[in-house]
Image: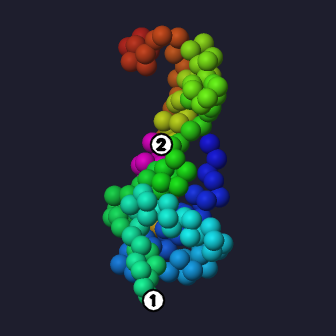
């Protein structure tokens, strides 16, 4: 999965809002402070507003305001708002017409790609904007992996080890 330039820019802009959650920030200021091209910033503002993450304020002192609680809004919320679902592999859309890959049922890699998506979603969903931006905390994953025979659940593998 690639984090798009648009998502990176959106995260920079929303960080400005999280730092001053009660302020109205002009799109031009957000763009300048975040090193985002202004035309791109306008597009990002529309995406963030459509997702309900910011509220647009009209008028001479208009711009955008944070519309969510940064203590409850996760990195995953922003990623999904700007670039859609977290997709690591192409198993879901590799077939003709965007249907799931026809080899998905027999593919030995599908489970790895799907687990990767779950791990990324878990990581992005485990950290709030407040934790990242205000508290300046860094998530540190503590994942372990185990290979189990085809058709055997993780629980069965754990029972077998005991």
> Residue 13, position in %: x, y?
53, 70
User: Please, what secondary structure does the residue beneath circle 1 have?
Assistant: loop
> Residue 81, position in %: x, y?
48, 54
Residue at x 52% of width, y 15% of height: 148
> Residue 61, position in %: x, y?
44, 87
**In the rendered image, which quarter contains the N terminus?**
top right
Residue at x 48% of width, y 10% of height: 151
Task: Provide the residue span drawn in magenta.
Answer: 121-130
**In the rendered image, which quarter contains the C terminus?**
top left
Is 69 rendered above or below residue 100?
below
Residue at x 33% of width, y 64% of height: 69
Q: Which mark is residue 60?
A: 1
User: Please, what secondary structure does the residue beneath circle 2 have?
Assistant: helix
Callout 1 crowding tier (Cα within 10 Å): few <14, some 14–19, many ≥20: few
Residue at x 40% of width, y 62% of height: 53
Extreme-front residue of the structure: 97
Report the side of 144 relative to 101 (left or right): left
Q: Are marks 2 and 1 in contact (CB under 8 Å)?
A: no
Is 19 rendered above or below residue 75?
below
Report the side of 116 relative to 72 (left or right): right
Please report whichever mark, 2 or 1, sits nearer to the chain's N-terminal start: 1
Please check the rendered image and state whether residue 122 is part of the magenta-colored stretch, yes or no.
Answer: yes
Report the side of 24 relative to 111 (left or right): left
Residue 139 visible in rendering: no
Q: Residue 121 carries which label?
A: 2
Nearer mark to the viewer, of 2 and 1: 1
């Amino acid at each position: 999965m690639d984090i798009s330039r648009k998502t990176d820019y959106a995260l920079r802009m929303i960080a400005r809002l999280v730092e001053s959650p009660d302020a109205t920030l002009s799109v031009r200021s957000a763009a300048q402070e975040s090193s985002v091209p202004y035309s791109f910033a306008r597009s990002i503002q529309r995406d963030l507003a459509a997702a309900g993450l910011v509220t647009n304020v009209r008028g001479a002192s208009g711009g955008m305001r944070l519309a969510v609680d940064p203590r409850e809004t996760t990195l995953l919320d922003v990623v999904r708002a700007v670039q859609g679902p977290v997709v690591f592999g192409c198993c879901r859309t590799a077939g003709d017409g965007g249907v799931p890959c026809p080899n998905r049922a027999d593919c030995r890699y599908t489970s790895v790609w799907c687990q990767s998506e779950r791990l990324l979603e878990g990581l992005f969903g485990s950290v709030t904007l407040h934790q990242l931006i205000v508290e300046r905390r860094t998530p540190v994953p503590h994942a372990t992996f185990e290979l189990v025979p085809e058709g055997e659940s993780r629980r069965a593998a754990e029972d077998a080890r005991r």
